[in-house]
Amino acid sequence: MASSLGRYGKYPGRRKTQQILALGRLGWTLRRIEEATGIRRETASRYLKRAGIEVRPPDRWGHPVPPESAKAAIGLITDSAADSKAAIRVITDSDPPRPRHNPSASACEPYRKLIEQAASRGRNAMAIWQDLVDDHGFSHSYQSVGRFMKKLRGERVREAHPVIETAPGEEGQVDYGGDGPMVLDAKTNKYRRMRLFVFTLGCSRKSVRLLTWKSSSKIWAELHEEAFRRLGGAPRVVVLDNLKEGVLKPDVYEPGLNPLYRDMLAHYGVTALPCRVRDPNRKGKVERSVDHAQRKLKGLRFEGPEEAQAP
């Protein structure tokens, strides 16, 4: 019986089992089901076979390669190896040497710690240059500070994230952006900040942006339906955060979906895939869309929701 246990030492519950079966019907590989649900691929395979669902062999997501095409590609690469070496040799011989940068140290180097501390507080290059001039008698130009800050940003080690590839119509990502535009409320005759709802397709990055005064389980479901209408259909999988409108019980192993939201998705044949706790990068595409919309609407005021929705 040990082989049927999940990654966390538990048997998959009813909701998790239904999720495994739904993803199996979509043609997901066992490896991908394991990464998305946390259930070992051996356990997922057993449940799929028991339900009579064909287990998909491992390959590139959404891009199965026929054996004859693979052999042809291998032969093509092998035959062109000599040409590749020749091309590399021609490029290497023809490229002129790049000019080296001036080895002299930057005029900002003595103030490195001050600049790093100011940049960590969100100060831009102009503000830092003004502080250096006023407080430290800095006699060099603003451009020198700008170049030095670009160098500092280049020295930072960026965190690596995997590229998530999805087939057309397969996945959508959804999120709320708390900082929407300021809109005049006709009831109070005062400007209020609306909430921003964004639904982004995983393959094309096409987004639907909607505004709402408040949120609830019903409004959350209605916003999804409006997004589906504007997109002309619904994706097979929706990746969402653990907000209460969609997920009542956040859990690494078996999150509990809001019943109204679950039934609405089932009506459209969509499978919900909540992100794991503290793993927002799984829906980075929609978060990028939210950030773009917020920057576009920042500082603007509108006389009504219809005017705010127009951009």
Image: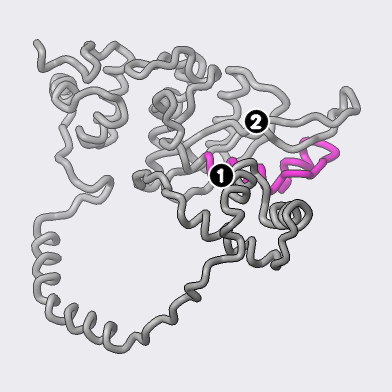
The residue sitting at 35% across, 19% down in the picture is 252
- Mostly what secondary structure, the magenta segment? helix
Query: Between residues 149 and 6, which one lies in front from this camera angle?
Result: 149
Magenta span covers which residues?
287-311
Q: Secondary structure at mark 2?
A: loop
Q: Position of residue 122 (x, y in %)?
A: 65, 44
Q: Position of residue 28 (x, y in %)?
A: 25, 36
277 to the left or right of 289: left
- The quarter holding residue 23 reads top left
Above or below, comparing residue 311 to residue 273 in the picture: below
Any part of residue 272 in sight: no
Q: Which mark sits nearer the N-terminus, 1 or 2? A: 2
Do residues under tags 1 and 2 come within 8 Å of each other at their CB atoms?
no
Q: Which residue is mark 2?
A: 178
Badge 2 crowding class, 10 Å Cα cut-off, few under 14, some 14 to 19, many 20 or more, is: few
Above or below, comparing residue 251 to residue 234 in the picture: above
Query: Between residues 55 and 80, which one lies in front from this camera angle?
Result: 80
Q: Is residue 245 magenta?
A: no
Q: Secondary structure at mark 1?
A: helix
The residue sitting at 25% across, 37% down in the picture is 27
Any part of residue 137 in sight: yes
Q: Position of residue 60 (x, y in %)?
A: 23, 48
201 to the left or right of 25: right
Q: Which residue is mark 1?
A: 289
Q: Position of residue 9 (x, y in %)?
A: 21, 13
Type of the residue with mark 1: Ser
Above or below, comparing residue 153 to residue 249 in the picture: below
4 to the left or right of 116: left
In which quadrant will I find the N terminus? top left
Type of the residue with mark 2: Gly
Q: Is residue 301 magenta?
A: yes
Find residue 306 and name its label: none
